[in-house]
Every structure is written in structure tokens, then in C-alpha cells.
Image (tube, rainbow, N blue to C red):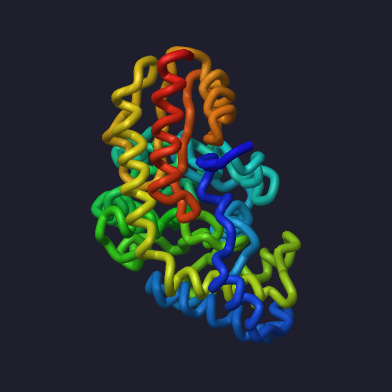
Amino acid sequence: MGRVVDLRSDTVTKPTPAMLRAMSEAVVGDDVLGDDPTVADLERVGAELLGKEAGLFLPSGTMSNNVAIKVHTRPGDEVLLDWDAHSARYEVGAPAVISSVVMRQFRSDRGVPRVDEIASSIQNATLHTPGTALILLENTHNVAGGAVIPEAVHREISCLAREHGVAVHLDGARLFNASVAAGVPVSRFATHADTVTFCLSKGLGCPVGSVLCGSSDLIGRARRVRKMLGGGMRQSGILAAAGLYALRHHVADLADDHRRARDLAEALTTCSGVTVDMATVQTNMVYFTTDAPADRWVDGLRERGVWCLNLGPTRVRLVTHRDVDDEGIEHAVGALRELARVV
């Protein structure tokens, strides 16, 4: 096979030589015993960026979300989250299994929550009903095409939650994408949530890891849950060093991913047999619907050296990232246009 342009996800990135060098030179200890200095540095830097008291390094965003849910709830409590939230669709029912919570879902418009639905859904615990303990938000919103929830909406939901004594957790797997796209510091989004997680292994280009941030008390409790779930890692400073490098050197590059996604989407508007909602192309994702079965598009693109995923019978996702340059986008555009003529 010739050149491969892998647009399946921004999780497929490989560490750069400079990142690998930082990993190889990391000073490590035993993080479970609390003495890995590089992990401690990453947790401190992550918390400072988000304006929180403390951070916790975890293996994945899924674990990070579920640690947060466990910390904020008791068995039988209710969690409100978007109908298409990652925690509802792609975490194998973990909130129900690990935290024994009831998940009730609200709708959004292109990923932006309907605040009135959240307001009408919050309920107190009674003899007959579970009490709402947590509102979970996702920014950027994956299934909505990488759309950004505006900071003003976060503020509105935060005020609503405080009024009712409900906690807020932000699944900020791609929060830095939202920050770059909106021109808003991550700390401004984070101030409206009790806990926030962000992934290092997506657009930031690290091999693994997420950081959960919040108050010292919440993160102390989260550390215990991480251990309970088997997420305690030993000489994990080797991985944390990659995260530190990415936070210092890779954030600004996300703007290039967004530009390239826009180029892809605009090219798709000229292809027959597909529809793309340009209003959702705000960060590094492009979703398009197809007249022909999505499998035919995925298979046809793969034959032309472009890898992507179908997320439904007629829906295809393309994700740009730091390992796909302008030449790669040109290759993908050519493959899309060629396939559109024959599919």
C-alpha cells in the first residue's frame, strides 16, 4: 500500500521525536506511593491551567469520567447528561456498573445543551424518585461533530446546578480544541464545573493519559477510586513527561487541525452523494451523511489510502490531527472526489 492518511481518530497520533526524548529523560518514582516527580508536575500544571486546586493523572478519559461520577454520586443517584454523551454511548455502561447511578438524558442542538430541559429534569430525592446529584457535560461534543459548547452556556448551567445543590462534571476530552476554536482559556470553561477531565492522547498527541482536575478534597477522593479501579500506575512519569511536553508545545497546533478539517468539509460540499453540515465543523471533526451505504465510502476510501470510520448506516467521520499535514489533506480530498464519482 502507498501513502496512508489515517483520519479514523485523533487518538492515532504517534509521539514526536522531541516528545520521545522527553519521555526517555523523565525522572520517575512510584506514583502509587506518591513519589513520581514528573507525574506530580503534570498534575500541578494541569490543575493550574484549569484554575483548579489539584489534578490526578489517569490512564484514560473513560476512567477519568467514571472516577468523577463515582466521587460525585452515591448508588441510586441520578446523573443528567446529553443523549449522545460519550459516557452514555461509548463507556460500556460503566456509570451504571461502577457507580450504580441512574442516567437520564437531555437533548442538545448541535451539541449545545438545551438548558431548559436540564432545568426541568433536575429533581429532589423522594420516597419515589432518585435525586439529581450530577450534571455531566461534554466539550467539544464528539457525536455532534466536534461542536463547541459556548462558555455562556456553561455559566448558565453552572448557576442552575448551584441553585439546586447539584455538582457539574465536564468531560473535556477535547477541551483544548474548544479553547482554541472559541478563543477562550480552558480555565474559563473549567470554572463552571466542579471537576474537569482533559485527554492528552487525542489532539495533543500523547500515547496515553488524561488528567482529572478539581478541588483538593475531590481529587483526594478520586485518587482512592483510581486505585480501586486498577488505575494506579507506577513509574508513570514516563507517560506524564509526554503530557507535559504536549501542554507546553502542542496546544497552539490545534488551530491547524481545525483549518484542515474545514478544508475537508468544504471539499465534501462539492461531492455528489454526501451532505455535510458546515455549522458543526468547528474543530477537528467532519461528519457527513451518505446516499450510498457508509460502508461503501469507508471501504472505497481505504482502497485509496484514506482511513476513516462509519458511525451509522449512512454516517462517516473524519478526524484531523497533528500527524496529517496539508499534503495528507490534499490526498484525502482527491480520494473523496474520485470516490464520489463512482460510489
**Residue lying furthest front in this view?**
2
Q: How many marks?
A: 0
Q: Position of residue 115 (x, y in %)?
A: 30, 41
Name which residue lies at 65% across and 45% down.
94
- Residue 136 in the figure: left or right of residue 67: left
- Residue 323 in the figure: left or right of residue 120: right
The image shows residue 267, relative to residue 47, as above or below, that is above
Q: Position of residue 140 (x, y in %)?
A: 40, 48
Name which residue lies at 31% across and 41% down.
262
- Residue 160 in the figure: left or right of residue 294: left
Residue 181 seen in the current view: yes
**Residue 45 or residue 278, whichever sits in front:** 278
The image shows residue 92, relative to residue 190, as above or below, that is above
Name which residue lies at 42% across and 51% down.
325
Residue 106 seen in the current view: no
Name the quadrant containing residue 142: top left
Name which residue lies at 54% across and 70% down.
243
Q: Quadrant of the N terminus?
A: top right
Q: Position of residue 78 (x, y in %)?
A: 53, 44
**Residue 128 or residue 170, whichever sits in front:** 170
**Residue 9 or residue 330, whichever sits in front:** 330
Q: Position of residue 328 (x, y in %)?
A: 45, 44
Name the quadrant containing residue 3: top right
The image shows residue 331, relative to residue 15, as above or below, that is above
- Residue 186 in the figure: left or right of residue 25: left
Name the quadrant containing residue 184: bottom left
